[in-house]
C-alpha cells in the first residue's frame, strides 16, 4: 500500500467504506457469506487512514 499515490489511496478508501456499508447490511439481514471479510475491510480502512496520516505529518514538516 505504501507505493500507492494519495489519489489511489483515497479511491481505495472510498471503495472499502462502500464495501463495509454493504457488509453491515448483509450482516443485519443474515445474508453474510464471509463474516471474516468485515474484519479485513475494517483493518484495511485503518491501514489506509494510518498511511494518509503519516503522509500528512511528514509533508507538514
Image (spheres, helix red, strand yellow):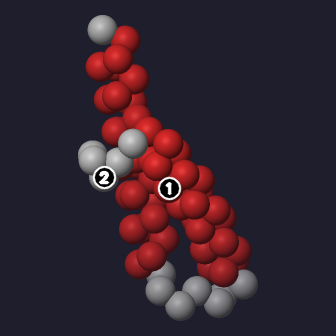
Residue 27's quadrant in the figure? Answer: bottom right
Residue 50's quadrant in the figure? Answer: top left
Secondary structure of residue under mark 1:
helix
Q: Which residue is mark 1?
A: 12
Q: Position of residue 16 (x, y in %)?
A: 53, 61
Q: Position of residue 29 (x, y in %)?
A: 72, 84
Q: Position of residue 8 (x, y in %)?
A: 46, 49
How many numbered discs, if any? Answer: 2
Residue at 30% over, 8% down: 61
Q: Is residue 59 visible?
A: yes
Location of residue 55 with respect to 48 vertically, above or below: above
Frontmost residue, 51 versus 5:
5
Q: What's the CA distance linking mark 1 and mark 2?
A: 10 Å
**Do the residues bearing badges 1 and 2 touch, measured as CB atoms within 8 Å?**
yes
Q: Which residue is mark 2?
A: 1
Q: Position of residue 31 (x, y in %)?
A: 65, 90
Is residue 12 shown left or right of residue 25?
A: left
Frontmost residue, 40 versus 56:
56
Residue 59's quadrant in the figure? Answer: top left
Density class for disc 1 (Cα within 10 Å; few <14, some 14-19, many ≥20) is some
Residue at 54% over, 52% down: 11
Q: Which mark is residue 50?
A: none
Label located before the other in sequence (1 or 2) = 2
Density class for disc 2 (Cα within 10 Å; few <14, some 14-19, many ≥20) is few
Amino acid at each position: 500500500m505504501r507505493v500507492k499515490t494519495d489519489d489511489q489511496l483515497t479511491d481505495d478508501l472510498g471503495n472499502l467504506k462502500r464495501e463495509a456499508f454493504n457488509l453491515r447490511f448483509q450482516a443485519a439481514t443474515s445474508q453474510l457469506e464471509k463474516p471474516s471479510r468485515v474484519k479485513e475491510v475494517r483493518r484495511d480502512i485503518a491501514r489506509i487512514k494510518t498511511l494518509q496520516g503519516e503522509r500528512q505529518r511528514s509533508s507538514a514538516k
